[in-house]
């Protein structure tokens, strides 16, 4: 931009006409017009006056320095640099993503701390008890009964035991299974006087082939396999069905001593069949109890067939459902949840102390519905693992990981945790635009462009300095030549004076 174009741009920025500028400089408007058209240049004495009128330096007017940034622009630059520094020093990728998305445009925001009571009614809790809905939505998971349909879960239970477990290191089970699969998964549960529940976290699991008689040797290294054993439950089919014959069950000490032995033939007269939900109460001596199975007395050992049953199962499955958000989600690249989670289970023993297990890896699932999908399916969900620390935290879900996330959102279901008792404080759910990668690359490209421009300016300055250096050398040569000529003239003058 030459000086004429610069004067024209500055004049228009300040809302001045050529006549107004000419009046300020006490010259004609035609002179201003010639400057701006590049026909003529301002006289040297006009340069400081123009710079003062426009509120800039003479160097800036002549294009010798960059324009000064405004106060607002400086603040934006400082904020960008601070955000970049914060991102570069972030503790992990999640924190870096949070910084980049902090100012991302919102497609939709569900802020429970500011939401009206009427709008909160659209979010229906299932398996949750709302403790408080002021400031944020505070909820507590409660056990609920869910229909699991027809199940095949045969169980052979040895009840009425009283055996010290401090000297037991192995469980030997002699059995054979004929089923609908090549391999089966067997699971052994146990109860103690300290904990009388058949819990998943108190079980030992193994796999074995179909059809052959074998001895399963299970090493016992479970931390809760201690105290007084009151019951042992063998589930021969984790998945599948068929016929199972159990010949014997033995508990072995580390020295190989048999601490307890159950021979099927000796217990054939002590077998009781019960329904799936029947309690095992009042059993004073070792007794075999079959559940979800039919006994085959004509066959050897304790032989039973799987008996499919329909059951209601009590589960921890807290969820928060909104069935009519009616949002276009094509621009929603990220889902932001601000949530606090603390685990608990009142039915568990004191070892399950959340103060001692403050950082437990939990799994959150977010299901969604779109037109053509009438239910919350496994295909239409996002899964994220996070630490249930009992502290408020921000969780970001990348929606590009699921190809079904597009069109109109007709339903949203938040499952904050899988298979645990917990309390929650949900403050916000947001749908965000943009991606940190694009923002970051744009920011870095801008920096690279500025660096390239500075390097070009430095090269231009070096060229100018080289030119000035050449001019200086020429001037020095000219001075030397003039000095030589001056010396010659002085010599001739001296000669003339000597002749006179």
Image: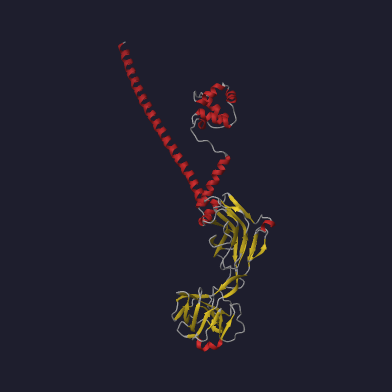
Answer above or below: position of 472 versus 447: above
- Residue 60 lies, in percent from the top left, at 51, 32
Residue at image location 49% in from the left, 46% down from the top: 442
- Tally of numbered discs: 0
Image coordinates for residue 284, horizontal then vertical, percent: 59, 86
Residue 225: x %, y % from top left? 53, 78
Residue placed furthest toward the top: 500
Work out whether 311 lies above or below 35: below
- Residue at the image point whose x is 32% and y is 16% from the top: 492
* 174 left or right of 272 in image: left
Residue at (55, 76) in percent of width and height:
308
Q: Is residue 274 left or right of residue 462?
A: right
Can the viewer see residue 464 in this picture? Answer: yes
The answer to which of 209 and 498 lies nearer the viewer is 209
Quarter in which the C terminus is drawn: top left
Up-down relation of residue 382 to residue 153 (above or below) = above
Tell me if I can see residue 232 in this picture.
no
Q: In the displayed structure, does residue 463 sit left or right of residue 291?
A: left
């Amino acid at each position: 931009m030459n000086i004429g174009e610069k004067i024209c741009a500055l004049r228009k920025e300040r809302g001045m006409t050529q006549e107004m500028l000419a009046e300020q400089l006490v010259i004609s408007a035609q002179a201003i017009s010639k400057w701006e058209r590049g026909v003529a240049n301002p006289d040297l004495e006009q340069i400081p006056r123009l710079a003062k009128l426009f509120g800039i330096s003479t160097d800036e007017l002549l294009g010798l320095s960059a324009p000064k940034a405004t106060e607002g622009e400086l603040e934006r630059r400082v904020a960008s640099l601070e955000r970049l520094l914060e991102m570069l020093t972030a503790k992990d990728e999640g924190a870096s993503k949070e910084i980049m998305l902090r100012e991302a445009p919102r497609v939709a925001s569900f802020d429970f701390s500011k939401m009206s009571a009427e709008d909160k009614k659209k979010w229906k809790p299932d398996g949750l008890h709302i403790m408080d809905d002021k400031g944020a939505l505070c909820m507590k998971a409660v056990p609920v009964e869910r229909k699991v349909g027809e199940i095949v879960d045969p169980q052979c239970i040895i009840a009425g035991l009283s055996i010290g477990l401090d000297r037991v290191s192995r469980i030997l089970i002699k059995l054979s299974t004929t089923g609908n699969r090549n391999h089966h998964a067997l699971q052994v549960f146990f109860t103690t006087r300290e904990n009388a529940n058949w819990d998943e976290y108190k079980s030992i699991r193994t796999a074995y082939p179909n059809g052959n008689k074998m001895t399963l040797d299970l090493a016992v290294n479970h931390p809760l396999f201690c105290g007084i054993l009151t019951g042992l439950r063998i589930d021969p089919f984790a998945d599948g069905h068929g016929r199972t014959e159990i010949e014997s069950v033995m508990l072995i000490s580390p020295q190989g001593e048999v601490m307890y032995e159950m021979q099927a033939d000796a217990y054939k007269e002590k077998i009781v069949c019960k329904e799936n939900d029947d309690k095992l109460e009042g059993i004073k001596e070792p007794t075999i109890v079959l559940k979800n199975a039919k006994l085959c007395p004509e066959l050897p050992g304790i032989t039973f067939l799987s008996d499919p049953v329909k059951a209601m199962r009590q589960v921890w499955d807290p969820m928060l459902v909104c069935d009519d958000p009616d949002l276009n989600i094509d621009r929603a690249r990220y889902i932001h949840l601000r949530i606090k989670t603390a685990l608990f289970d009142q039915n568990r023993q004191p070892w399950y102390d959340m103060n001692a297990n403050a950082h437990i890896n939990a799994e959150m699932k977010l299901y969604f519905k779109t037109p053509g999908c009438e239910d919350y399916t496994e295909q239409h969900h996002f899964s994220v693992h996070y630490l249930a620390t009992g502290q408020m935290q921000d969780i970001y879900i990348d929606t590009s990981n699921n190809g079904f996330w597009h069109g109109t959102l007709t339903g949203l279901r938040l499952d904050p945790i899988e298979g645990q008792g917990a309390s929650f404080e949900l403050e916000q759910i947001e749908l965000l635009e943009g991606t940190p990668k694009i923002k970051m690359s744009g920011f870095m490209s801008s920096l690279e462009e500025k660096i390239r421009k500075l390097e070009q300016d430095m090269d231009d300055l070096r060229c100018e300095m080289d030119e000035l250096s050449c001019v200086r050398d020429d001037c020095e040569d000219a001075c030397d030549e003039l000095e030589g000529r001056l010396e010659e003239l002085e010599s001739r003058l001296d000669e003339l004076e000597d002749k006179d």
